[in-house]
Amino acid sequence: MNMITRRDIAVAAAAILLTLSVIGRAEQKQPVQGSAVFDWNSIPAKPTESGSVRLFFRGPTATLDSLDIHVTTVDPGKAPHPPHRHLNEELVIIKEGTLEFLENGEWKRAGPGSVLFIALNDFHGIRNPGPGTVTYHVIGWISHQS
């Protein structure tokens, strides 16, 4: 018959502590964003297949599980991604250029200053018909109620 040794107990205790530590770290949440200024010139534009994107912020706030703020520039004749659905809502505010927005199966044109609202799980798409680039701000969120 095998006896449990002090070494066996020590190894088991260490394994339990390590497991609890890993679980604790996994449950830690990203800090909540406070008030801040996100300067355009300090946010680098990262190249994409269709143009570029500047990520200003992505994370939780006091009232939202997730807030995503980025600016996308799309080259003429391109789209940032195929039409799709997602489980969050978004606002798109056009800074410059003209884009086409797929809403309820119909492509609609929108220019500078226009605001698009994308509802939860609505099938939508954005493309740049040209001739110049189009730049737009995206504000997307997931609330505690979602």
Image (cartoon, rainbow, N blue to C red):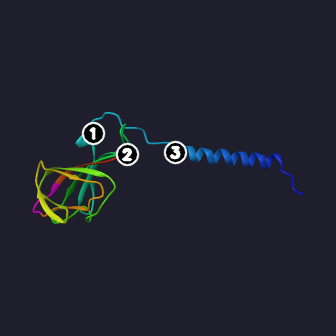
Mark earlier in primary sequence (2, 3): 3
Residue shown at the point (70%, 46%) measured from the top left: 14
Helix, strand or loop at label 1? It is loop
Q: Amino acid at mark 2?
A: Gln
Residue at image mark 2: 145
Foreground label between 1 and 2: 2
Helix, strand or loop at label 2? It is loop
Residue shown at the point (12%, 47%) measured from the top left: 113
Residue at image mark 3: 27
Residue 25 position in % (x across, y down): 54, 44
Q: Are marks 1 and 3 in contact (CB under 8 Å)?
A: no
Q: Residues within 10 Å of mark 2 (few under 14, many from 20)?
A: few
Residue at image mark 1: 38
64 is higher (above) or lower (below) than 82: above
Residue 12 position in % (x across, y down): 73, 49
Position of the N terminus, as image quadrant, is bottom right
Foreground label between 1 and 3: 3
**Residue 1 horizontal side relative to residue 81, left or right:** right
**Residue 7 horizontal side relative to residue 98, left or right:** right
